[in-house]
Amino acid sequence: MVENMALTRKMLKGMGIEEEKIDLIIDAHIEVTEALKNDVKKYRDDAEKLPVVQKELDDLKAKGEDGYKEKYEKEHSAFETYKSEIAKKETYTANEAAYRTLLKNAGIKEKYIDTIVRAERSVIENIKLTDGKIDDEKSLTDSAKTNWADFVVTTTTHPAGVETPPANNGGSAVTRESISQIKDPAERRAAIAQNLDLFGKGESK
């Protein structure tokens, strides 16, 4: 019976092996040893997984053929749901891009488009596209111009040398609070649009 002996430089010298060959033998020995250690670790890790895998197999076996069918249907359903969610997100992204273009073409001020898009999520979800174009584009454009009229870009020409006198409003000053108390939504939006400076949205002219 041959005993396991550690391979050492001293032992190899005692066997009359040349120094340069000793280095080659030692390096090869280390490489083989490390590979064996890695294999042992892999086998140990696999062995630790076996009880878990065995339990899953036992559970499926206990359920009979229905067990495999149930697992397949569950995984298939999860995958189909995942595909549906991805498709839904891609559709919404395409619809949103088309709607942003529509708002811009309708004359909506660009700095308000993000706000309008967030408010019109349900409209965007129901948009139908054909070759990247909105099917009922004219109807949606008219609706956008009506619903967001206060945010449409308008160009006003004033006669030279004529200044617009300050609004008197019957002697009462317009304030942020007074505008916020207007109950009619359309009137409130119009008042906000006419007094954007009170809401921190004034534009430099």
Image (tube, rainbow, N blue to C red):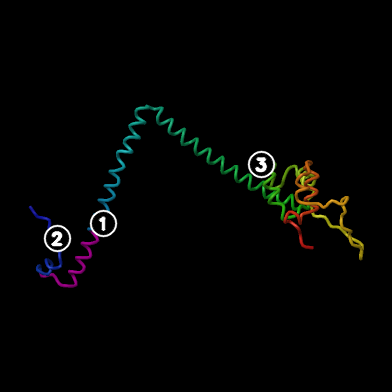
Looking at the rendering, the stretch of residues picked out in magenta corresponds to: 16-32
Residue 13 vertical placement versus 183 (above, below): below
Drawn side of residue 121 relative to residue 37, left or right: right
* N-term-proximal mark, 3 vs 2: 2
Tell whether label 3 touches label 1 (CB within 8 Å).
Answer: no
* Residue toward you, 96 or 13: 96
* N-term-proximal mark, 1 vs 3: 1
Residue 153 vertical placement versus 130 (above, below): below
Whole-angstrom CA distance, mark 1 to mark 3, is 58 Å
Q: Amino acid at mark 2?
A: Ala
Circle 1 residue: 35
Circle 3 residue: 125
Circle 2 residue: 6
The image shows residue 43 at horizontal and vertical percentages of: 27, 47
Q: Secondary structure at mark 3?
A: helix
Q: Amino acid at mark 1?
A: Ala
Drawn side of residue 13 relative to residue 134, left or right: left
**At 88% from the left edge and 50% from the top edge, which residue is drawn?**
170
- Label annotation for residue 14: none
**At 73% from the left edge and 56% from the top edge, which residue is drawn?**
201
Residue 52 within the segment the image draws in magenta: no
The image shows residue 110 at horizontal and vertical percentages of: 73, 55
Tell whether label 2 touches label 3 (CB within 8 Å).
Answer: no
* N-term-proximal mark, 2 vs 1: 2
Whole-angstrom CA distance, mark 3 to mark 2, is 73 Å
**At 54% from the left edge and 41% from the top edge, which residue is drawn?**
83
Crowding at label 1, few (<14), some or many (≥20) Cα neighbours within 10 Å? few
Q: Nearer the viewer, mark 1 or mark 3?
A: 3
Q: Secondary structure at mark 1?
A: helix
